[in-house]
Image (cartoon, rainbow, N blue to C red):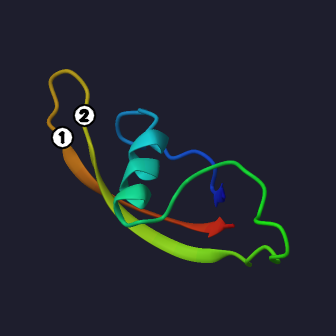
């Protein structure tokens, strides 16, 4: 699966949150793997997604929720 955008970052804290987005998608039952499509199947077109994750914040600032949007292609 390919995600667009490929990287997610908290604009306030400049922390890479891509792994948290992957975990949230997997919790929804969407496997984030970088393999080939199954033989005999056509790849699916881009499918939109939206997940809410928690940015851990930086020292001196608290955690906060972020909504991450994008598309996935299988």
Vertical order, 17 against 31 (above or below): above
Tell which circle, 1 or 2, labels the residue nearer the N-terminal end: 2
Q: Secondary structure at mark 2?
A: loop
Q: Can you tell which mark lies on residue 57?
A: 2
Q: Are marks 1 and 2 in contact (CB under 8 Å)?
A: yes
Label 2 CA crowd tier, 10 Å (few <14, some 14–19, many 20+): some
Vertical order, 19 against 45 (above or below): above
Vertical order, 68 against 64 (above or below): below
Residue 51 at x, y = what percent? 37, 64
* Residue nearest the observer in this picture, 60 or 33: 33
The residue identified by callout 1 is 63
Label 1 CA crowd tier, 10 Å (few <14, some 14–19, many 20+): few
Q: Secondary structure at mark 1?
A: loop
At 37% across and 66% down in the image, what residue appears?
28
Specify the quadrant that holds the N terminus. Answer: bottom right
Specify the quadrant that holds the C terminus. Answer: bottom right
* Residue nearest the observer in this picture, 63 or 29: 29
Residue 72 at x, y = what percent? 62, 66
C-alpha separation, residue under disc 1 versus residue under disc 2 = 5 Å
Q: Quadrant of residue 13?
A: top left
Residue 46 at x, y = what percent? 69, 75
At 41% across and 66% down in the image, what residue appears?
29
At 46% across and 50% down in the image, what residue appears?
22
């Amino acid at each position: 699966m390919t995600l667009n955008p490929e990287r997610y970052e908290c604009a306030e804290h400049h922390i890479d949150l891509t792994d948290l987005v992957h975990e949230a998608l997997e919790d929804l039952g969407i496997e984030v793997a970088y393999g080939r499509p199954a033989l005999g199947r056509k790849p699916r077109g881009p499918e939109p997604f939206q997940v809410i994750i928690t940015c851990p914040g930086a020292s001196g600032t608290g955690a906060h929720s972020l909504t991450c949007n994008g598309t996935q292609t299988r």
